[in-house]
Amino acid sequence: MYVCGVDDAGRGSVLGPLVIAGILIHHSKLQLLKSMGVRDSKRLTKQSRHKLYNKIIDLADDYYVAKISAKKIDRYVYQHNLNLLEAEYMGKTISALKPQISYIDSCDVNAIRFGNIVSRLSNSKIFSLHHADSKLIVVSAASIIAKVTRDNIIIKLQKKYNVGSGYPSDMLTHEFIENCIKNKVIPYFVRNSWKTVRSINNLYHCRNFASIIK
């Protein structure tokens, strides 16, 4: 039996794409993933993730990676449909890999509902769980593929811009967004729909208005 694991990376970031990755592997190889040290990407160092990335690709029977642009993310967020966007791309990933059964990490509070949507979109048998990346080795492997793919994209951006990590809690990321708004140039990889961007934008315009009043 061939099984598939699917996970995302970068959902909470204010910069860069949302990455969806899936791997297809024969169930007889799952123990090999465990012996290689595969586990949830968040519990691994950056160096360990990168080493495991190549090993996973070599061992897997197939894999698929989708990168969802900031512009497309914005369109769905403004419609309050981010979960649907992720479900659609998980469906595309599973359809491309054609497994007999798939395990996915649910981003919806209702994992069964999310799984039913992905199942309908992919016409495939789905098991949807919360924290599947830490519970199921095949999803852990997918989480590593997704995370390393996104890491590499952010590294390229960091070589050109002082973007920091891209996450809202990073002050470098805040400063980068504020400078973009100040200079009235918002790069293609900024998620304008994010509360972080809207808050900085509102604060900047309030400051300018206050200066005019004075």
Image (tube, rainbow, N blue to C red):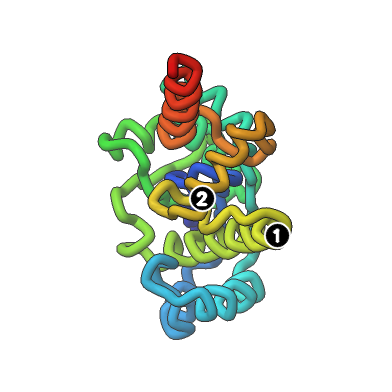
Q: Please tell me which residue lies in front, 159 or 38.
A: 159
Q: Earlier in the sequence, mark 2 or mark 1?
A: 1
Q: Is residue 140 left or right of residue 176?
A: left
Mark 1 surroundings: few (<14), some (14-19) or many (≥20) residues within 10 A: few
Q: Which residue is mark 2?
A: 173
Does residue 168 appear in the picture of this structure? yes
Q: Which residue is mark 1?
A: 156
Measured along the vertical axis of the image, is residue 135 above or below residue 29?
A: above
Outermost residue to the bottom: 35
Measured along the vertical axis of the image, is residue 116 above or below residue 79?
A: below
Q: Position of residue 192 (x, y in %)?
A: 54, 30
Does residue 24 appear in the picture of this structure? no
Label 1, secondary structure: give it: helix
Measured along the vertical axis of the image, is residue 153 above or below residue 197?
A: below
Q: Position of residue 10 (x, y in %)?
A: 50, 50
Give the foreground label among 2 and 1. 2
Mark 2 surroundings: few (<14), some (14-19) or many (≥20) residues within 10 A: many
Q: CA distance from mark 2 to mark 1?
A: 15 Å
Q: Quadrant of residue 107?
A: top left
Label 2, secondary structure: give it: helix
Residue at (38, 37) in percent of width and height: 115
Outermost residue to the right: 160
Q: Amino acid at mark 1?
A: Lys
Q: Amino acid at mark 2?
A: Thr
Q: Quadrant of the C terminus?
A: top left
Q: Please tell me which residue lies in front, 91 or 37.
A: 37
